[in-house]
Amino acid sequence: MKPVVNLTQQSVVGEIESVLDTYPSHPYQQAFAIPDLRQELIAFVLNRIPSFYSVMSDGQIPLAQAEEGSLAYYELPRKPFEQQLHLQNLIHQGICLIVQEKSDWISNHLCETVEPACEPSHWFG
């Protein structure tokens, strides 16, 4: 039986990486480094675009490598510029929506990851 690979998900994950690189580290890149938020962003985008799948033949890379993210060979079919802009727009929308909806949770979670010695002193009032 030949494995089926979701090309859309791999492409979306790569595009999310590219788009997040354009955002400041704090809070955006740090927030979406949290696996739950990253998965929520991926799901947000995937739910709004059609999916493309491919069956891997015997001569192609093993599924284990594909799952590790070495799918450089397997990319979505060439997409027009408008489709890429649409995908990037969805990613920006997802980032904004998730950060708005989860701002308190993100603030608390990112504050917890700060080392106590690096926090400003409250001693001076």
Image (tube, grey):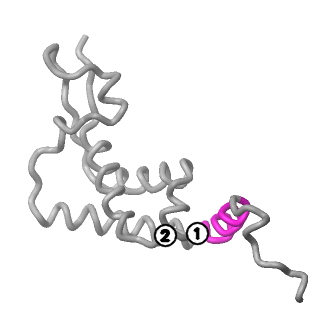
Identify which amino acid the numbered label 1 is placed on.
Glu
Main SS, magenta region, reads helix
Q: Which mark is on residue 97?
A: 2
Look at the numbered disc 2 and give the secondary structure of its residue. Answer: helix
Spatial CA span between label 1 and label 2: 6 Å
Task: List x then y, in percent, for residue 118.
Answer: 73, 69
Task: List x then y, in percent, for residue 22.
Answer: 35, 70
Instruction: Out of 119 and 82, give the one closest to the viewer.
Output: 119
Q: Is residue 99 depicted above or below 39 in this figure?
A: below
For the C terminus, give its image quadrant: bottom right
Identified at 30% across, 50% down, the residue is 14
| Pointer 1 local density, CA inside 10 Å: few below 14, some 14–19, many at least 20 | few
For mark 1, what is the residue?
Answer: 101
Q: Is residue 8 depicted above or below 66 in this figure?
A: below
Q: Which residues are magenta?
A: 101-112
Task: List x then y, in percent, for residue 52.
Answer: 21, 40
- Residue 4 as seen in the image, left or right of residue 105: left
